[in-house]
């Protein structure tokens, strides 16, 4: 198939390479013209995504490839999803009758829309052609062909299957399901708990504390997901518990690293400046907090992380407040 990948960051380059090696015709669209030129001329390596891009992958800053592609893969930061969609539409790009895949993890701040809903809000009538690809899958490992399992979810089961057929190979296993809501919520909110997990590391607490954050975080994640229309069982699969574990424990996790810096005494701004890539959990902490308020959900960890990030609450006070909450049944 002819596939255009939006985003030439680490994950976008990794997925583009995987698709190319699976035998597809792949073009990467990069918004930065100079970066697109340098990548196309093999003068630049994608961040942490292994070696130079394969020679057969074209990188462009123009829009010609979109209308001749069979599939469009979004791998842009969630904060830029709407702006990217608007840019495509204003340049005559149509997504009608194309397979649309979102590998972007996030919930839009102001609207509280999932990424598939943002795409639908700009390109009306395409929702049933959207699949979401998510699960425990760091680019640093996928590009080395480390065995990995993810989920393809869509409101249209056949679309999930089409997405799987593009990506599946002997080291990248893809499961399919129809709970697109649950998969997207899990993908977005797990980053908030990864920040909490990093704070635990920065405070030099131990495994007991982190296990409490991960297990109770999963409970909160599922509570939000079910309230938004997802299925509870989804959160105990790859896009829920699986993604939560890898993000909370991995040395590759940007969100965990930001949390660790904050737990060590740095400000949010200082912590983010030490990382060269987008940290989705910071923006998603706002969305998670606002969803909790809107739906009147009790989300103690999410609420406390929001206060640490945006109200300068001392992480030590946060831990004490979580530990001394009114006793209750699990």
Image (tube, rainbow, N blue to C red):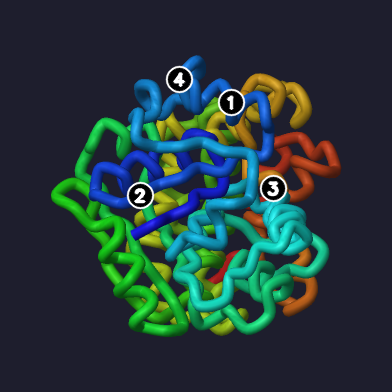
Image spot of residue 279 (x, y percent): 63, 39
For the residues carrying marks 2 and 3, which lies nearer the camera in this image? 2
Name the element at disc 3.
helix
Name the element at disc 4.
loop
Nearest to the observer: residue 117 or residue 71: 71
State the residue position of label 2: 25
Calculate the distance from the C-alpha at mark 2 to the C-alpha at mark 3. Answer: 43 Å
Q: Which residue is painted at 51% across and 25% down in the image?
A: 39
Q: Earlier in the sequence, mark 2 or mark 1?
A: 2
Q: Is residue 329 visible?
A: no
Q: Earlier in the sequence, mark 4 or mark 3?
A: 4
**Residue 305 circle label:** 3
Q: Which residue is painted at 24% across and 49% down in the image?
A: 22
Q: Earlier in the sequence, mark 2 or mark 3?
A: 2
Neighbour tally class for label 1: few under 14, some 14-19, many 20 plus, Cα within 10 Å: some
**Residue 42 circle label:** 4
Calculate the distance from the C-alpha at mark 1 to the C-alpha at mark 4. Answer: 9 Å
**Residue 37 circle label:** 1
**Residue 140 circle label:** none
287 relative position to 100: left or right = right
């Amino acid at each position: 198939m002819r596939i255009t990948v939006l985003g030439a960051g680490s994950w976008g380059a990794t997925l583009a390479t995987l698709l190319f090696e699976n035998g597809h015709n792949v073009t990467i669209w990069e918004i930065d013209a100079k970066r697109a030129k340098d990548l196309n001329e093999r003068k630049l390596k994608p961040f942490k995504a292994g070696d130079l891009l394969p020679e057969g992958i074209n990188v462009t800053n123009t829009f010609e490839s979109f209308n001749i592609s069979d599939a469009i893969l979004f791998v842009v930061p969630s904060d830029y999803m709407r702006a990217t969609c608007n840019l495509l539409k204003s340049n005559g790009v149509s997504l009608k009758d194309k397979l649309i895949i979102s590998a972007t993890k996030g919930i839009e701040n102001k609207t509280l829309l999932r990424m598939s809903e943002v795409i639908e809000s700009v390109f009306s009538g395409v929702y049933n052609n959207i699949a979401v690809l998510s699960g425990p899958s760091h680019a640093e490992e996928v590009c080395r062909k480390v065995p990995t399992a993810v989920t393809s979810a869509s409101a249209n089961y056949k679309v999930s299957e089409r997405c799987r057929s593009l990506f599946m190979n002997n080291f990248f296993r893809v499961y399919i399901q129809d709970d697109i809501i649950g998969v997207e919520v899990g993908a977005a909110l797990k980053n908030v708990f990864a920040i909490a997990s990093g704070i635990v590391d920065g405070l030099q607490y131990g495994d007991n504390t982190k296990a409490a954050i991960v297990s109770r975080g999963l409970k909160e994640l599922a509570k939000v997901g079910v309230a938004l229309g997802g299925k509870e069982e989804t959160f105990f699969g790859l896009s829920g518990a699986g993604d939560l574990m890898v993000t909370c424990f991995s040395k590759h996790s940007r969100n965990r690293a930001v949390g660790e810096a904050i737990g060590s005494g740095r400000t949010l701004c200082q912590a983010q400046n030490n990382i060269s890539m987008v940290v989705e959990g910071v923006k998603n902490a706002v969305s998670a907090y606002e969803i909790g308020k809107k739906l009147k959900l009790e989300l103690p960890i999410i609420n406390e992380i929001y206060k640490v990030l945006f109200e300068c609450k001392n992480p030590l006070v946060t831990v004490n407040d979580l530990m001394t909450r009114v006793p209750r049944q699990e």
